[in-house]
Image (cartoon, rainbow, N blue to C red):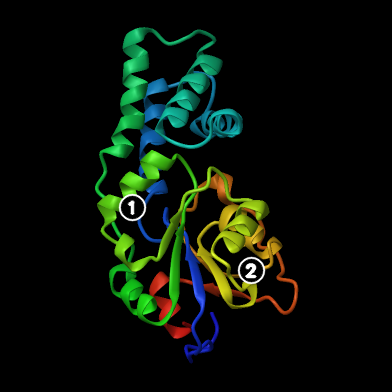
Amino acid sequence: MRSSKKMLLHSQTLLIDADDTLWANNIYFERAIASFIAYLDHGRHTPAEVRAVLNSCEHATIAVHGYGMASFERSLVDCYTQLSEASPSESQRQQIAGFARSIGDQAIELLHGVAETLPALARRHRLILVTKGNRVEQQRKIDRSGIHLHFVAIEIPPEKHPQAYSDIVARHDLDPGTSWMIGNSPRSDINPALAAGLNAVYVHHPDTWILEREALAEPAPPRRLLQISRFDALGNYF
């Protein structure tokens, strides 16, 4: 991480991710997956091999059905069917559905420093929340979090790719040179935002979803990429 001295004194537009940037998210999926793997208790495949099959199922499901609890449940069922070589019974399907439902039952837990840092950032900069996924589910989490009042706008695209960021830039009349995408996912937050001509801040998170991991891209000058270890470190730059 660079020096703690403030680097950016004038007003910026900060596009901020939600899941695993503002609040905990993937850890609940990981717990559900661990419960599913234990329930499957496969005789021939190791837990790591089962997880690899589930990753493949999730990738395929998302491509067709998008994100959300229904897609996650579908992926669990598909994984069970592939590895068991038979469709689950009704009672088994209900058990699998319970693993997915357990995620939605979790309270919204803001990550360290978020509650204190967001208001300070909002006083100095224009904040736009940008979180991908199922619109109804993501909006429900935003409402439950209580942090939406700090943002001038909320964007919930089904996927975060360069065109999605370009559309946001156009819709809000942003200056890419003074706009930053902030998040924990190289695949969804950092690399496509850089490709769309924005600056970016990568906020390290130890439990980022495996399907969101990839090497960080190099920003094309004069665009910039900052890397920080915690959300509250944003106050050192903005």
The crowding category of the residue bearing disc 2, from other C-alpha atoms within 10 Å (few below 14, some 14 to 19, many at least 20), is many
Q: Residue at x 31, y 74 (%)?
A: 119
Q: How many marks?
A: 2
Determine the CA span between mark 1 and mark 2. 24 Å
* Residue 78 horizontal/vertical position (percent): 52, 20
According to the picture, the residue beneath numbered tag 1 turns out to be 142
Between 238 and 216, the one nearer to me in the picture: 238
Q: Residue at x 66, y 62 (%)?
A: 216
Q: Is residue 22 left or right of residue 203?
A: left
What's the residue type where badge 2 is placed?
Answer: Leu
Between 184 and 85, the one nearer to me in the picture: 184
- What number is the disc on residue 108? none
* Residue 65 horizontal/vertical position (percent): 54, 29
What's the residue type where badge 1 is placed?
Answer: Ile
The answer to whether 149 is drawn above or below residue 68 in the figure is: below
According to the picture, the residue beneath numbered tag 2 turns out to be 198
The answer to whether 76 is drawn above or below residue 9 in the figure is: above
* Residue 207 horizontal/vertical position (percent): 45, 53
* Residue 61 horizontal/vertical position (percent): 56, 28
